[in-house]
Amino acid sequence: MSKRTTIQRQITLNVILPVVGAILLIAVLNYLRTQNLLNESETTKNSLISDNIKALIRFQDYTLHLIEENLDAQMREMSHALVYKEFPAFDNIENINLNRILDEYELDPKLWAIYIMRNDGVVVNTTFKQDSGLNFFEFGDRFQEFITNEVLKDGTFKTERMGDEKNTNKKRKYSYQATLDKNYVVELGVYSDDATQLVQGIKTQLNEIAENQASVVSVDLFVGDENPLSFNSDKVIMDQNLPVFKRALESKSIAKTFDKQTNLAYEFIYFEREESNLYGHSVIRIITDRTAHESIIRREIIMLLSVFGVTMGILLWLIYIRSRKITTPIKRLADKVTTITEGNLNERAEVRGNNEITTLSEKFNVMLERLEEFYNELEQKVMERTQEISQQKEEIEAQRDNLAQSNLELEKAYKEIEEHQERITDSIKYAKRIQNVILPSKEYVSRVLPNCFVLYKPKDIVSGDFYWMAEYGDKICFAAVDCTGHGVPGAFMSLVGYNSLNDAIKGHPGLSASEILEGLNKNVISILRQKDDSEAESINDGMDIALCVYDKNSQMMQFSGAYRPLYLLRDGKIEEFKGDKKPIGRFMEGQGIKFHTHEIQLKKGDSIYIFSDGYCDQFGGPRGKKYLPKRFKATLEELADQDIRTQGDLLDQALLEWMGDHHEQIDDVVVIGLGIR
């Protein structure tokens, strides 16, 4: 049950809360707008700083280019002299005295330096001992590709733009030329005082950029990919910011991060220097202190809270004054309603004033008068209805007693039916034991036909299908029989068929397969009294059968069938031998039923299959259709490479998968398979 609220509270909820929500929304939007403006201001400022730095660096690179043009010819002449004149005479270039060469060419060792760099980037000999053993390939992939793909591959003289020397941080121009054997690179380095002064002035201006911006802590230009160095200071990139630096390099754009502990914002801006192979990839780092930003935001929040508090105070006072004029008469009416609901229908609401509440009170009093009339009428009807219910209760109790007696009688009858069902089931189970006893045992089948399988699956406890096997002189007879019906009627027919088969061959050695079927037919007709239609007890039932007579010595197989075929699997393909369309156990007046014998000369690798119709007629699969002979043949062909006993297991598994969880077995199943070795 929901909690009741006063009109005063509902006015507060319906009027004040939306206003409060609107004010808060405006405050939040204003806060977000202020924060966004501060962020945009920082981004714009950093963009202007980076543009200024880029302009300074481009001016530096252009001025250095003018200075370098005066050095190119002299360095080319010296490099050619070393490669073609000096070094071919030495087998061990790594140990040559390079200072002697400087003296011979009257070069100032304070300005000139010679480097011998191996093709893996390591400096193996130099007049500038501070760089001995230094690996220039650590400056980045771009420089390594320049040395490998241009200098060593072409063998021509290459110059590099003025660059910063790692150990002295002075400007030096470098040239590169591969030795004749392409195992080394001769590198020349020349200092330029003009270039050094120019770069120092550029660095000073870069440092002044940070000093002139209140919130900017530092501005640095980092060069190099793997081990970045600051162009204008001795500052380094902290380990936690290296991934951000790498991201700016890889994306060739801007990457940002923020350190909450120090309240510092780091912005890395990628800068492409087209005139330099050694320091072509540069990144501008701008560190900004956001303390001032947070101070502005705090002042904004305090101002918003103050405005919000004053507005809420005024709004609450106005709503309280105005709502009292509305709620007082409503409260008096509510008190009267409470008294009336306690059962005092004689009470009436007080009518005062001339407004909507006055009209409501008048209408309420009219409603009370009508309610009082309805109450008296209802009380009379309740008394009459109570008397009717009492009478109906007595009738229901009498019916309940009769129903209880009927339930006892039904329960007794159910127990009797249950006992009869149990006795019938026990009898059927015992009949199954009898049926299993007369069927050939697994041991007998394995002894008579070692290389065969029998798949036998009754639908019910007992089966109308059965398999038969007997030694017949020096031959072996076996059959798959499908009797009319299944369950108990089929089981009785199977007993008739099994005994009739044994009687057909008893004392008659040398009979063909068709003659055995003809003898079976006569015996069944005699037992079932089918010749005399006038007898009330005659039965017009019978069986379908596939029967084989197998001579192990000659590998000759005789087959005769009544409505059942034989499948021969040879070389992976099924060949079908059809049985006669003639019945077993149905007497046909004036006709002597004769069956046809098929003779099949078997060979090694052949397989023979006879079966009832239960396997092919089974419903299943995704569409609930029959398995059908076509699918059965395809399954046998798929199993051609399997051992014959394994085929029996796989056929059983295939049938279960076809049925799945939604289909029950509809008929008895028997399949006999024989492999010829």
Image (tube, rainbow, N blue to C red):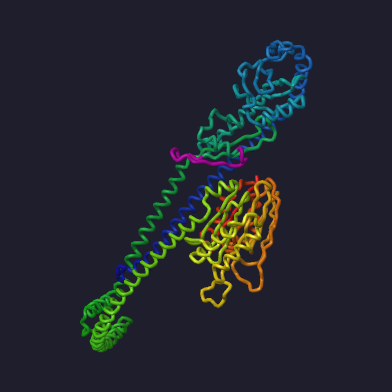
Q: Is residue 258 above or below residue 312?
A: above
Quarter of the figure with residue 415: bottom left
Task: Report whether 175 appears left or right of 239.
Answer: right
Quarter of the figure with residue 545: bottom right
For the N terminus, the image quarter is bottom left
For the C terminus, the image quarter is top right
In percent of the image, x 68 and y 54: which residue is there?
A: 574
Residue 239 % position (x, y): 51, 32
Residue 210 seen: yes
Q: Is residue 671 above or below residue 315?
A: above
Residue 236 % position (x, y): 53, 30
Foreground of the two, 87 or 557: 557
Residue 515 % position (x, y): 65, 60
Q: Is residue 196 above or below residue 320?
A: above
Task: Report whether 431 appears left or right of 624.
Answer: left
Foreground of the two, 187 or 120: 120
- Tell me where the magenta segment starts and ends, as one range: 249-265
Residue 463, magenta (yes or no)? no
Residue 621 seen: no
Foreground of the two, 17 or 558: 558
